Amino acid sequence: MNSSDLLGQIFVFGFEGFSPSEEFLRFFKKWHLGGVILFSENIESLSQIKDVIREIKSSSSILPFIMVDQEGGKKNRITQDFPTFPSNIYFGDGDDQSGLYDAYNTTALSLNDLGINVNLAPVVDVLTNSENKVIGERSFGSDPQKVSLFCKVAIDAIHKGGLLACAKHFPGIGDIDLDPHHEMPENRNSRERFEKTDFPPFRAAISAGVDFIMTTHLKCPNLDSKNPAPFSPTICSEILKKDLGYKGLVITDDMSMGAIKRNFDLLDACEKAYLAGHDLILLCHEYEKQYQILEYFSKLIKDKKIREDKLSDTLEKIILKKKKSLG
């Protein structure tokens, strides 16, 4: 197969209900999708989700990423007959590294048993705005050094449990007051402030060998005066990859969030995100939109608006990671 045949590898999609439809599974197989993300509404029981994951994996010639947000606290997608733990702030406030390790390691082992191979955790945002309800208890705290230390513990625990880890949300949303699920927030802090406060935990995550870094839907005019973070080559490539030295996979946050949907055309937004430096595009809902995006990207490649060599490089990076980490 050539690169265009494997285009679907750069996408991670969600599906509706307790079982993916036959249409979704055919779509998954046809386009060789890179992975799926699971939500609470997909999970009826542990045995059911095991069967679903087995079915999804059997629909792909390349082992897919099976992702979930199992952060602890309120951000747990699986709760029934499954070990759950407090939020990150509980461990940060208690300075409990041992408890944190046990929580993330037990979670990883339990997810692994279900067939899930990626926990989209930990959150490494530094909580510097007390009015920030988006992050809140999901953060380890307001001290960049503590967040850096605790994120390394969490990543190690996830890895020792056999899963891949994801640090989020770059370049940092600890100092915002709007929710990107609904609106596009803005952080007018200086580059120096980002370097001092927000970037240290991402540097720590990188040194711990984090597998994914998830960006966020955010305007940072003092990092890029023209583009919001997910469309910004400056933020996604120059800062994250060159300045911070990150070599792993870069994934968007859900492109169906209000911050994107209310302000941009979805197809154009996904194109800009890919060209900015993302390796994976996440779209959690709306099968019709997912189908349109694959068709749209296929045309972009045909029309040479996305270079074949760029796509080849991305695919090589994704598939190499899968072969190395998923077997």
Image (cartoon, rainbow, N blue to C red):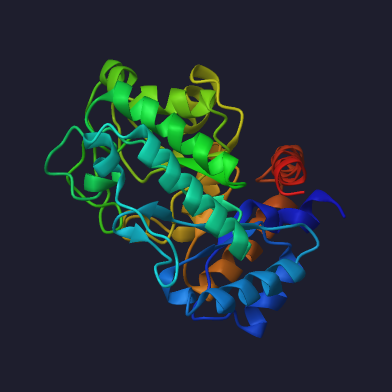
Residue at x 74%, y 57% (from the top left corner): 63
Question: From what the image shows, is residue 283 above or below residue 16?
Answer: above
Residue ID at (38%, 25%):
149
Identify which residue is drawn at 49% across, 81% down. Answer: 17
Q: Is residue 224 visible?
A: no
Please say if 232 is above or below 2.
above
* Side (left or right) of 172 relative to 24: left
Pick whichever, 314 or 261, lies toward us: 314
Based on the displayed image, in which of its 4 quarters is residue 187 positioned?
top left
* Position above or below: 201 against 232: above
Which residue is at the far bottom? 22
Where's residue 241, x and y in %?
Answer: 54, 25
Q: Is any part of residue 11 visible from this angle?
A: yes
Outermost residue, left side: 131
- Relative to residue 199, is residue 78 depicted above or below? below
| Between 268 and 219, the one nearer to me in the picture | 219
Q: Is residue 296 left or right of residue 137?
A: right
The N terminus is located in which quarter? bottom right
Residue 327: x and y, percent?
A: 77, 49
Picture coordinates of residue 290, whole percent (x, y):
56, 67
Relative to 92, 318 lies left or right = right
Q: Nearer the viewer, residue 278 or 107?
A: 107
| Residue 151 found in image quarter | top left
Query: Residue 180: percent from the left, percent from the top?
Result: 29, 52
